[in-house]
Structures are given as structure tokens and as C-alpha cells.
Image (cartoon, grey):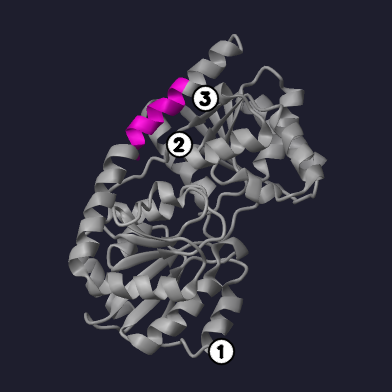
Amino acid sequence: MKILQLVTKRQFRGAEVFAANLSKELLKENIEIVFAGLYSPPQHALTVEGARNIDLNGVRSKLISWSLLQGLKNLIEQEKPDVIQANGSDTLKYAAVLKLLKPTIPITYRNISIISNWIGGSIPKLYFYKKLFSSIDHVTCVGDVARQNFINTIGFTSDRVTVINRGIPMHTVNRSVARVELREKFSLDEGHKIVVHVGNFSPEKNHTFLLDVFEQIKETDNSIKLLLLGEGMLMQEIKSKVEAKGLADTVFFGGFTNQVQDIIAGCDLFALSSKIEGVPGVILEAAAQKIPAIAVDVGGVKEVVKHNQTGVLIPTHDPNRFAEELLLLLQDDQKRTELAQNAYHMVESDYDPLVNLHKFINLYKEMLAKNGR
């Protein structure tokens, strides 16, 4: 079997990292993988060892770039994949049009977010999305909230939309060593507690909210620091806001890393304040290193941050409440340990890469059978 994993670009973001991790597991099952990005990759390109990694180097278009579509069509004709999996964002529209050109190839779409948030209240946009999805054979969602929202919004029948959890690779990190190395890197000492956030510097990740929170935190306890990992278009803007708010000694920037769990392991708490989320993989990666999370309740966050069980859930984007709960959590070592253990066991049982791998393989086989292949 050969699978084309189509991503927007070979970047370290949610949909792409998910597709890469799944591809690595599929390769172990002797399934061939073509890992293709529509657009040119960033400086740090996401690569799947053992797969054919391809960049179509297309130019973004509001509708369809016909040269990019032709490049994708040529790739299909050359590689002859059995199944195409489109993973988020612009891959949807190209997969939908491709289905018109290659109707016998089964296509599945991976939905990692809450689809109604992206459509908003726009009737034309809703019609456009419904038209695109009508060409897709099957949709997999990251969680129950995302699935139900998709069914309600797009109108798919329930048999065409399933939940397949993310598979979270888990590996052991020496937390004592990680703590020392992290504090040395940022000239901190063991008395400093580090709250970490991982995410692209984009509007939906809502970094400004965390700065508002840490303005209050600093007034109460200046030993608590915020580490922001990632890159993105708003990074310089956030750095300027850090300076303007007098938080240069409180908020630190870790830049790009492809070893997220290794750094998270040296921290004390994970924080998430996104405006939109499906089921955030970074919270699960933190849980894999027994680091609990505090997060705002949006989208499917509640599926992994179960209040006072696997983390602390804040009902709304209230910086005062967030700061208060964060301080209480960092003062209570026993509670953090209990939350961390529960979160770790949740990842172990529900987000096992092998279990979810075989769900995808079964889906591919079912799609091939329905298409008579």
C-alpha cells in the first residue's frame, strides 16, 4: 500500500507534525509514504525519514493555483498512491479538485480543528466548504467535539466522520538534567519555576493573553517565568510587547525546536490560551513528560484538560482568573504531581500511536474496498 500524505508545507505545526508522526508508524508496517507539501518549506523543514519527501513549491492563491494543481496531478500519476490523506488547511481545496480529476482514488481529510470557527457566520464560505467536502470520501477528527461540530456544520452523515486520536510518541527524558540545562540556558536558578507554551506565533495562539497574565504574575511572584517556544509571523510583535510591558526578565523566547518533549520536561507547568483549538497535541506532549497543563476552555481542549483531573481548565479568557489559578497550582506541588500522573496515564491509554495507527490502516483498507480497489 502507498499513501500520499499531503500537507500545506513541511513545517512543524499541528497538522503537519501529526501527519509526519503517523507516516513514521506507517513506514514500520511496510506501507510506502509520499510526504508532500503544497508550498515551499520553511528554514527548518519537517522530514519523514524513509518516506519520499517532496515540495511542490506552489504559490498561494485565494482559489486554486492551476500550476500547483498540475504539479500535484503529475505527482499522483508518477507515484500512483492507493490513498490520499489531506491534512488540514489548503490541502482540502486541492484534494477536492483532484478528486474530480482522479475520481477512483480514495481521499480522506484530517480535521484537527473546530470547523465552524474557521467558517464563522459567512453563508458563502459555508457553501464553499460544503462543496469542497462533498468530494471527500471520509473525514477523521481529532476528538468528539471536533467531530460533532463537523457533522453539524458541514452536514456529513455520521458514518463518513470518525474520531481517530493523535498518536503521541513517548520517550523518557531525564527531568533533573533537563531542568538544569534549561535554567543554565536562560541564566535562571533552581528556585525559578518555568511555565512553557509551545505554538506558532499566530493570532489564534493568543500570546498577548499570556503576556497580560504574566504582568500580574510578576507583581505577585517574580520567580515565575514564561518560556515561549516556536516561530511565526507575530514573533517580533510579541517581543516588542514584552519590552513595552517590562517583562524582559520574565518572558523568554526559545525559538524553533524539534525536540519539544525534551524541553517541556525541564519545566513546571504548560500553559495554553488559544482562541481556537481542536485537541492540542502540545498538551499531550507535556503530559507524556508528566507536566500538567492550565488552559482556556475552547474547542476540544476539555477532552484532554479535564478540570482538576489532568489539569486546570479556565472557562473564559479571563487573565485575572488564569493568573490566580496558575499561582495556586505552582504553589501546590502535590496537586501538580497528581494532575501530571493522571495526564500521563491518559496519554498512555488513549493516545497510543500503535492503536491509532491501526485505526488508520483499517480506514484505508475500507476506503479501498468501497472504491473496488
Q: Find residue 164 and report its horizontal and vertical position in percent.
A: 45, 33
Q: Amino acid at mark 1?
A: Ala
Please, is residue 48 above or below residue 130 in the view?
Answer: below
**Residue drawn at (20%, 69%), measured in percent from left and top?**
333
Residue under label 3, please give it.
2
Q: Given this view, does label 2 or label 1 mark the residue nearer the observer?
A: 1
Q: Which residue is mark 1?
A: 244
- Residue 354 falls inside the magenta stretch: yes
Nearest the viewer among 150 and 74 is 150
Q: Is residue 121 left or right of residue 141?
A: right
Q: Earlier in the sequence, mark 1 or mark 3?
A: 3
Q: Which mark is residue 23?
A: 2
The vertical placement of 219 against 349, above or below, is: below
For the residue pair 326 and 68, the one nearer the viewer reads as 326
Amino acid identity at mark 3: Lys
Q: Which residues are magenta?
A: 351-362
Q: Is residue 280 visible?
A: no
Tell me the SS state at disc 3.
strand
Image-quadrant location for residue 265: bottom left
Location of residue 48 with respect to 102 vertically, above or below = below
